[in-house]
């Protein structure tokens, strides 16, 4: 589906408030008013924050433009961009803070994480940290695991102070990661080593190094903890049994299979296929692809809306983001972003 022409039209303060503003779901505070096309500095307030008018609340999507050094702010109901936030160099992924009130923008070549307040879209703090390509808190919040894409290691930090505790050598270009449901294992892919590494979270040491198909990216462990799924750019999903970390099957997804996102019940995983402009629907129990649908622009990082009705997908090669109806698998809208959009964050 081609990207439809998109024109930002003026939005008055009165019109914006009449529509309910950009209220973060579950947070009693309004973001706005933001005029479409507004560019905000990372340290500047996004506008006056106040009580949300009675009526509908809207989620907000943040989209990291890794080459543009900005975040696109999109209205989660109208499915269109409303503003841009300037951030540090090369933002890639997001991670919500432990208190749930802010989100970290991981700015890789700036070597910092920006803590962005979700009620105001204002930067609360800048945290120096080496190459935070992707970060993940342990379930208890005590530790922060970080993959450093420009290097060949995973670093484990104190979850409160972010002090580096230890470094585990993994492989070249570690990128995507996951924690087992019981928190016992941390797993990550190493895109240019064609491996997956398994780290024992108790000892913080390397437990296993597993060979996979070329350029592995997305990785997840099933809700029951019994299986690990790895997407590789050659088009496969490798399925491992976690009791012995053994490969048990490979499933074809599509050329450039990249990232995985699971539904809230863990029964379905959506897989983006960057090089063929599609996404696959993977049935976890049956361990097979049951459907495939088009997504333009080199689909990269998918994220589900809080109610699971929409799949948001960044178009890494097309400078777009596409929103898909998960019931019909039809495209609801495709809109422009900044250059090379990557991670997407929607408040839950």
Image: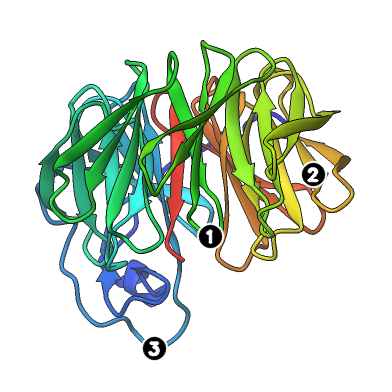
Residue at image location 63% in from the left, 40% down from the top: 260
Residue at image location 33% in from the left, 76% down from the top: 27
Q: Are marks 2 and 3 in contact (CB under 8 Å)?
A: no
Residue 58 in percent (x, y) is at 45, 69
Residue 36 in percent (x, y) is at 34, 48
Left or right: 74, with 335 as reference point: left
- To which residue does mark 1 refer? 182
- To which residue does mark 2 refer? 281
Left or right: 312, with 69 as reference point: right
| Residue 298 higher or lower than 219, as above or below | above
Of marks 2 and 1, the one in the foreground: 1
Query: Which element is circle 3 on?
Result: loop
> Callout 1: few (<14), some (14-19), or many (20+) C-alpha neighbours within 10 Å?
few
Dividing the picture into quadrants, the one containing residue 150 is top left
Dividing the picture into quadrants, the one containing residue 218 is top right
Left or right: 326, with 173 as reference point: right
Query: Which element is circle 1 on?
Result: loop
Q: What's the CA distance linking mark 2 and mark 3?
A: 38 Å
Residue 66 in percent (x, y) is at 36, 26
Query: Which element is circle 2 on?
Result: strand
- To which residue does mark 3 refer? 54
């Amino acid at each position: 589906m081609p990207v439809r022409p998109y024109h930002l039209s003026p939005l008055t303060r009165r019109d914006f408030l009449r529509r309910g503003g950009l209220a973060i779901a579950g947070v009693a505070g309004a973001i706005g008013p933001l005029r479409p096309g507004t560019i905000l500095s990372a340290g500047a307030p996004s506008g006056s924050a106040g009580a949300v008018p009675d009526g509908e609340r809207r989620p907000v999507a943040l989209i990291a433009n890794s080459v543009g050094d900005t975040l696109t702010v999109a209205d989660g109901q109208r499915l269109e961009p409303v503003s841009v936030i300037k951030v540090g160099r090369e933002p890639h992924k997001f991670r919500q803070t432990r208190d749930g009130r802010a989100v970290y923008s991981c700015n890789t070549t700036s070597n910092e994480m920006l803590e962005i307040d979700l009620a105001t879209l204002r930067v609360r703090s800048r945290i120096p940290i080496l190459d935070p390509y992707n970060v993940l808190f342990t379930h208890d919040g005590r530790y922060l695991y970080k993959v450093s894409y420009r290097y060949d290691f995973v670093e484990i930090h104190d979850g409160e102070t972010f002090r580096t505790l230890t470094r585990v050598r993994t492989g070249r270009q570690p990128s995507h990661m996951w924690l087992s449901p019981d928190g016992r294992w941390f797993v990550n892919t190493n895109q240019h080593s064609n491996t997956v590494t398994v780290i024992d979270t108790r000892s913080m040491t390397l437990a296993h190094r597993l060979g996979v198909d070329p350029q592995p990216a997305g990785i997840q462990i099933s809700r029951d903890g019994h299986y690990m799924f790895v997407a590789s750019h050659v088009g496969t999903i490798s399925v491992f049994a976690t009791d012995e970390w053994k490969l048990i099957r490979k499933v074809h997804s599509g050329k450039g299979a990249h990232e995985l996102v699971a539904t809230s019940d863990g029964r379905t995983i959506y897989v983006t296929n960057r090089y063929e402009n599609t996404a696959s629907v993977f049935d976890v129990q049956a361990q097979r692809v049951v459907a495939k649908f088009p997504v333009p622009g080199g689909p990269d990082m998918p994220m589900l809306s809080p109610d699971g009705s929409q799949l948001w997908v960044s178009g890494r090669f097309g400078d777009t983001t596409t929103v898909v109806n998960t019931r019909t698998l039809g495209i609801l809208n495709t809109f422009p972003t900044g250059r090379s959009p990557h991670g997407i964050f929607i408040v839950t």
